[in-house]
Amino acid sequence: SQTIHQWPATLVQPVGSPLSLECTVEGTSNPNLYWYRQAAGRGLQLLFYSVGIGQISSEVPQNLSASRPQDRQFILSSKKLLLSDSGFYLCAWSITDNEQFFGPGTRLTVL
Amino acid sequence: QKEVEQDPGPLSVPEGAIVSLNCTYSNSAFQYFMWYRQYSRKGPELLMYTYSSGNKEDGRFTAQVDKSSKYISLFIRDSQPSDSATYLCAMKDTGFQKLVFGTGTRLLVSP
C-alpha cells in the first residue's frame, strides 16, 4: 500500500530564515505530487504540482519554490520566510489525476 | 463569487442523527467530485469519490451529485462522535490538474 510522509511535523522559524519541507511517497511509482497551504478558515490553496522529476508548475507567485529531485520526493523551500508564510503545509500525491491523497502535514509558524 | 461554496458551520448534531453536508459550485465543467474528512491538525482523508451525476454509497456514507443544480451532498447515517471533524468538498475538470476545494464544514457529533 502507498504511504506519504512529511517532515518536520511542526516548525517554528524566525522571519527571514530559510525553509525546507520534505515529502516522500512510498509504494507507488511516478506519482503526481502537490504542495498545498491551508490557512485557518480559508481552505486549501495549491502552491505547486509536479508530474515528474524536475517538472514543477507554480500556481501562486510568492517567495516559495519547489523541487523534485527524485521520483517520490518533493521539497518545498524558501530563502527568506515572511510572517504570511505561516500555515499548515500539506503534500499530496495522485496517480489518476483525479483523487489526491494527503500527507499528515507540517505546521509552520513564522515569528 | 467563489467557484465552490461550503457553509463553514459548525453543524452540531446528537449521536445517531443523519447528517447532510453540502457544496454548491459555479463551474459546469467539473466532472469529478470528492469528499475529504479532516481531523484537527491532521491531513485530509479521502472519504468518497464520484464521477459525474448520481449517488455512491460506502457504509454509513452516501455521496450525491446533482450536476443540473451544481450541488453535491454527503450524507452520514447513524452519526458517531468519531465523525466530528471538518468535511471538505473538492472537484475538478477533466484532464486538469487542479482540485478546487470548499473551505470545509465543521461537524460536531455529541454523545
Image (cartoon, rainbow, N blue to C red):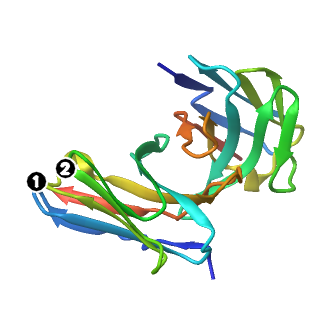
User: Does residue A20 appear in this view?
Assistant: no
Q: Chain of mark 1?
A: B
Image x and y of residue A27, in percent: 56, 16
Q: Nearer the viewer, residue A70 or B12?
A: A70
- B37 is higher (above) or lower (below) than B8: above
Q: Nearer the viewer, residue A86 or A96?
A: A96
Q: Given the image, on which type of amino acid does mark 1 rest?
A: Pro
Find numbered disc 1 in the image and state the secondary structure of the residue it sits on: loop
Q: Which mark is residue B111?
A: 1
Do marks 1 and 2 share a subunit?
A: yes
Residue B72 sits in quarter: bottom left
The residue shown at (84%, 49%) is: A58
Residue B26 appears at what percent x and percent y? 59, 78
Q: Residue at x 52, y 64 (%)?
A: B103
Q: Residue at x 72, y 23 (%)?
A: A73
Nearer to us in this view, A110 or B86 = B86
Q: In this image, A55 relative to B56: left or right?
A: right
- How many neighbours does mark 2 have within 10 angstroms: few (below 14), some (14-19), or many (20 or more)? some
Residue B50 visible at all: yes
Q: Marks 1 and 2, Cα distance to the nearest angstrom?
A: 6 Å
Of callouts 1 and 2, the N-terminal one: 2
Sort mark 1 into few (<14), some (14-19) or many (20+) by Cα contacts within 10 Å: few
Residue A49 appears at what percent x and percent y?
Answer: 75, 42
| Residue that numbered label 2 is attached to | B81
Mark 1 in CB contact with mark 2 (< 8 angstroms): yes
Taking the image as shown, residue B6 lies to the left or right of residue A13, namely left
Q: Amino acid at mark 2?
A: Pro
Relative to A73, does residue B68 appear above or below in the rendering? below
Q: Which element type, helix, strand or loop, lies under badge 2?
A: helix
